[in-house]
Image (cartoon, grey):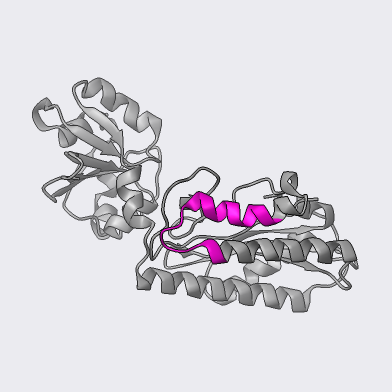
Amino acid sequence: MRRDGIDALLITPCASLFYLTGADLWRSERLIASVLRSDGSWENLGPAFEAERLRRSGLPGEILTWEEAQNPNPLLARMLAPGGASLKVAVEGTTWFDDLAPLSRLLPSARVTSATPLISHFRMKKDPEEIALMRAAARITLAVIRSLMDEMKEGMTEEEVLQRAGELSQALGVPLDGMVQFGANSAIPHADAGSVKLREGQVILFDMGVTVHGYHSDVSRTFAFGKAPDRFQQIYGLVKAAQEAGFRAARPGTSAGAVDEAARYVIRKAGFAKDFTHRLGHGLGLEVHEQPYLVAGNSLLLEEGMTVTIEPGIYL
């Protein structure tokens, strides 16, 4: 913050607040805000009736409160710029507009900027403890998928399989979020599980993840139920080759866009460019989708400790 001339960082409940403070708070219509100043001091603002919860959350620094009938925005403005001083304030990127807009009127001399470049610089690079949590989450997710493959029977619906996946993950002590798609539905990225019934030779797409102490896994796996059709085997092999090309390209010093291109080239060369409809991958950590994004044109150079997904696809 001192290097970038930032006087105060404003952050409301989100993954980045948890990352910086360990306070796992949810966001609601009642304003909760934490302010970090360039001298290292913290100050927090929240509803008076939740003061004890905020104190127990682990937020560093003093807890200031506002009453239900009170407008908290003037209090927040004074926290950010005591005496109305002209300061540079960096705001965490997911802060709600309705929380931010009043500040521009109350602090007309303040320079407001995004805190995303500041915070993402640290969050992108994971330490060994963070990586260990994500590895644990990935192992659990793969164990759930293997169990599902052993249990699935013809006639089961997508919804039934997804419900069973949730039961398996809960038995292992973690929550699961994800999708199960059969047949034609597997060609629709991010389709919700429905009442489609499983049939012999049908394609099954799992896109699942669990959370271990706040850190996510994100695992996509494609299977055929019973004998795999020849066309499926051809496309599967091509996507696997593209993924391996992405793995090889993902090295420190390589741009995020170049990793996308390495995998995309394999699919484009085979004539399926228009069927690979999304970026290659994304960062993974306290959020399922976070920086860095492996997408064409992203010149960000990958660094040791960055954790990304490599997930090419061909959708027919």
From this view, report whether residue 60 is shown above or below residue 144.
above
Q: Residue at horizontal 37%, vertical 38%?
A: 95
From this view, report whether residue 52 is shown above or below residue 213.
above
Relative to the observer, which residue lies in front, 254 or 17?
Answer: 254
Is residue 162 something that shows in the picture?
Answer: no
Q: Residue at horizontal 51%, vertical 42%?
A: 297
Q: Position of residue 63 (x, y in %)?
A: 19, 48
From this view, report whether residue 280 is shown above or below residue 37.
below
Residue furthest front in the image: 269
On screen, residue 97 versus residue 189, left or right, reads: left
On screen, residue 264 versus residue 248, left or right, reads: right
Q: Position of residue 274 (x, y in %)?
A: 73, 44
Relative to the observer, which residue lies in front, 277 or 140?
Answer: 277
Q: Quadrant of residue 170?
A: bottom right
Q: Residue at horizontal 27%, vertical 27%?
A: 103
Task: Let me know if residue 257 is in the magenta part.
Answer: yes
Residue furthest left in the image: 83
Task: Let me know if residue 261 is in the magenta part.
Answer: yes
Relative to the observer, which residue lies in front, 277 or 77?
Answer: 277
Is residue 4 something that shows in the picture?
Answer: yes
From this view, report whether residue 163 is shown above or below residue 66.
below
Q: Which residues are magenta?
A: 248-266
Q: Residue at horizontal 36%, vertical 50%?
A: 120
